[in-house]
Image (cartoon, rainbow, N blue to C red):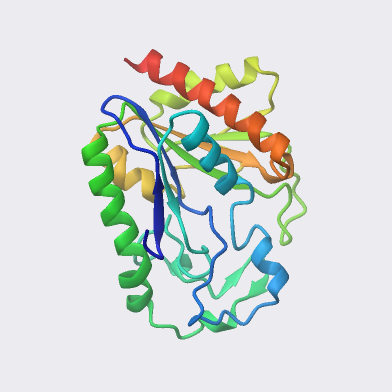
Amino acid sequence: MTEAFRQRGTPSPGGIVLVADHASNAVPADITLGIPAHLLHEHIAVDIGTEAIAEILAHEHAIPAHIAAVSRLVCDLNREEAAPGLVPETSDGHRIPGNVGVDREGRLDRFHRPYHTALADWLAQAEPSLILSFHSFTPRLETSDAARPWEVGVLYNQDDRAARIAIPLLEAEGLNVGDNLPYSGRDLNYTMNRHAEAEGRAYLGIELRQDLVQTTETQARWAHILADIAQRVASALR
């Protein structure tokens, strides 16, 4: 384990693996963000529910996981190195004063680069048939009045092979599914652009609405749904 990530389970060639870029709200003791403590439990700091579901998928559904171990407020692992939001000074209307004037190169060297180097090595060894890219989204942004009614979103950039299979499968479960919603994978898809699209690896980008994944019961339910959908997508891709 490092302070940037942890890995659960052992991949096997041709299997499914999971990547969770925003699963943690951890802030190292030597970093001060200067925000109220309660914000570390909100969507600006962590993709609520993803850590627990990733652990369930790894331990109970044999889907090994590469899981972020640091908050997106410390370093956003799903952004390009030059992206302004890599070390955010504001997030959904909240100032992050501890990030103003911060040593970006230091954060890149400490968190971003080790995370992605390890992920590249892990995927090269795993040779997966499908990567499950796993996030969650807030039902409503504080800086917008727009409702986000989708229960699950399927995100993609140029490679929509898995998305086109997964969307009707999820709809058949009776779910309100966003096709490249609540935001477009063509705008924010760094980890999968680098490790999947650039390498020709199939991936399924999933966003779950956070109010649906806050209890152990709902987390177990969603883990079951995602494992089933991922297996069916992987089979259809072969």
- 24 with respect to 177 (left or right): left
The quarter of the image holding the C terminus is: top left
116 horizontally vs 43: left or right: left
Q: Position of residue 169 (x, y in %)?
A: 56, 17
Count of numbered circles in the view: 0
Q: Residue at (63%, 19%) from the top-left corner?
A: 171
Q: Position of residue 85 (x, y in %)?
A: 48, 66
Which residue is at 34% across, 29% downward?
202
Residue 209 picture quarter? top right
The reply to whether residue 19 is in sight is yes
- In this rendering, does residue 183 appear at all? no
**Image-quadrant location for residue 117:** bottom left
**Residue at 65% across, 78% down:** 35
Q: Who is closer to the viewer here, 66 or 145?
A: 66
Figure check: 16 above or below 123? above
- Quarter of the image with the N terminus is bottom left
How far across and how far down the image is residue 228, in percent? 53, 20
> Which of the two residues, 27 or 161, is positioned nearer the viewer here?
27
Residue at horizontal 70%, vertical 19%?
174
Answer with the quarter of the image where residue 93 lies: bottom right
Against 83, residue 20 (above or below) is above
Please tell me whether residue 121 is drawn above or below residue 169 in the rendered image. Answer: below
Q: Nearer the viewer, residue 69 or 176?
A: 69
Instruction: Residue 220: give x, y in percent of width and height.
Output: 64, 33
